[in-house]
Image (spheres, helix red, strand yellow):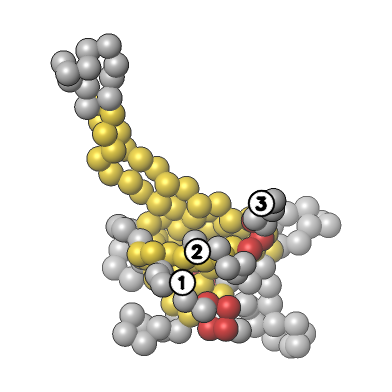
Amino acid sequence: MSTRSLLASAWALDVNTGTSDDPEWTPIKGMSSFKETIDSTMEDDSDFDDPEWGSDEVTQRKWRLECEGKRKRDADNETTFTPDPGQEFIRRAGNRVGVGSGIEIRYYRRDGAPDAWQGRANVQYGGGGGATTALEPFNFTLGGRGSRTELTPYPDLETETE
């Protein structure tokens, strides 16, 4: 069997701009970098049963997504600035604190790989500015708020986000 590498550009990220009871999944356009990280808290689990080797136990995990890209706007309207709805939802959430600052997201691969997750996250937003020849950047980190849920069976997400 020959193998082929997966492309990092196959990741997609949607935000729920509706409610939990009636979700409206809105894609975040313009991403050029996507990084999923799982951090583990480890505690020493060593005992006298194996005195020559130590042991660690995972006691907690945290997830986060680090994303960046270029800000987008409606290309059909040059007189009124209409931002990409997904990017704008992230930007606004990144300016809230406390109750209402958490958002519901889902992220998945569009190439058929079974990596698909849904959860709640807080938003740390950045972006703006650059050199005279630069395009307007955006970047954000989504910090998981509790566990995420694996979307199984793997849904047909391709048709839902179009």
Residue that appears at 63% across and 63% down = 10
- Real-space Cα separation, disc 3 to disc 2, in angstroms: 20 Å
Kindly tell me whether residue 93 is visible in this rendering.
Answer: no
CA separation in Å, label 1 and label 2: 6 Å
Badge 1 is on which residue?
A: 154
Which of disc 2 and disc 3 is earlier in sequence? 3
Q: Report the front residue among 155 and 43.
A: 155
Q: Are marks 3 and 1 in contact (CB under 8 Å)?
A: no
Closer to the eye: label 3 or 2: 3
* Amino acid type of the residue that numbered disc 1 sits on in the rendered structure: Tyr
Q: Is residue 78 above or below residue 118?
A: below
Q: Which comes sooner in the sequence, label 1 or label 2?
A: 2
Query: Which residue is located at x 39 percent, y 60 percent?
Result: 122
Residue at 67% over, 68% down: 30
Q: Mark 1 near mark 2, Cβ–Cβ under 8 Å?
A: yes
Q: Give x and y (percent) for residue 73.
A: 68, 77
Q: Which of 68 and 46 lies nearest the eye of the viewer?
A: 46
Q: Which residue is mark 2?
A: 114
Q: Earlier in the sequence, mark 3 or mark 1?
A: 3
> Which residue is the site of mark 3?
1
